[in-house]
Image: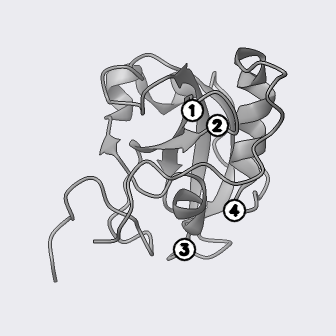
């Protein structure tokens, strides 16, 4: 069995995805990025090899996220999502941040229950990001007619 792939990589299953892995979510306007974070990969009642619990963290910036610049950010919203969500909304996992570094999962979730969440579609997290961070984007130009380019292309 091969070892963990180096970052960045585009996961096709949950085999090498760990809680704390994160990816950039390009916004529809403005050239900004939001950040998705893997919270758990043990979603037994859905599809254990393809489903994760992911969250949108309280971070938005003009460059893709790094482990350092997402430090201390809390989780705004989270849900159960297919691993394809990462490829559909950002392309690849960019890195890993130990959840314990930021006071653990309970603190990130604001003491909410991890498993009390809904199931999200592949691109649902993009809409959540735009709801939370849309105020950063000007009304003109209008929404992009095409999806933003992922941060990094290719599969490993």
Is the residue 135 above or below the residue 2 in the image?
Answer: above
Nearer the camera: disc 4 or disc 3 = 4
The residue sitting at 70% across, 39% down in the picture is 28
For the residue labelled by badge 2, is the local secondary structure a helix, a strand or a loop?
loop
Residues at marks 4 and 2 touching, judged by CB atoms closer than 8 Å = no
Nearer the camera: disc 4 or disc 2 = 2
The residue sitting at 50% across, 19% down in the picture is 73
How far is disc 2 from disc 1 in space, using C-alphas? 7 Å
| Disc ID at residue 50 | 3
Disc 2 target residue: 27
Residues at marks 2 and 1 touching, judged by CB atoms closer than 8 Å = yes
Disc 1 target residue: 34
Tell which of 29 and 119 is nearer to you: 29
Q: Earlier in the sequence, mark 1 or mark 4?
A: 1
Where is residue 58 drawn, in percent x and y? 59, 22
The residue sitting at 67% across, 71% down in the picture is 45
Disc 4 target residue: 122
């Amino acid at each position: 069995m091969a070892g963990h792939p180096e970052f960045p990589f585009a996961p096709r299953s949950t085999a090498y995805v760990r809680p704390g892995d994160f990816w950039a979510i390009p916004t529809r306007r403005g050239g900004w990025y939001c950040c998705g974070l893997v919270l758990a990969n043990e979603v037994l009642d859905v599809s254990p090899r393809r489903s994760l619990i992911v969250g949108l963290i309280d971070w938005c910036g003009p460059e893709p996220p790094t482990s350092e610049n997402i430090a201390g950010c809390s989780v705004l919203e989270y849900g159960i999502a297919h691993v394809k969500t990462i490829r559909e909304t950002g392309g690849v996992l960019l890195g890993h941040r130990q959840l314990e570094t930021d006071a653990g999962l309970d603190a990130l979730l604001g003491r909410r229950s991890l498993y009390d969440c809904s199931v999200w579609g592949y691109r649902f997290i993009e809409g959540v990001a735009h709801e939370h961070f849309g105020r950063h984007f000007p009304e003109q130009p209008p929404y992009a007619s095409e999806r933003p380019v992922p941060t990094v292309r290719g599969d490993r």
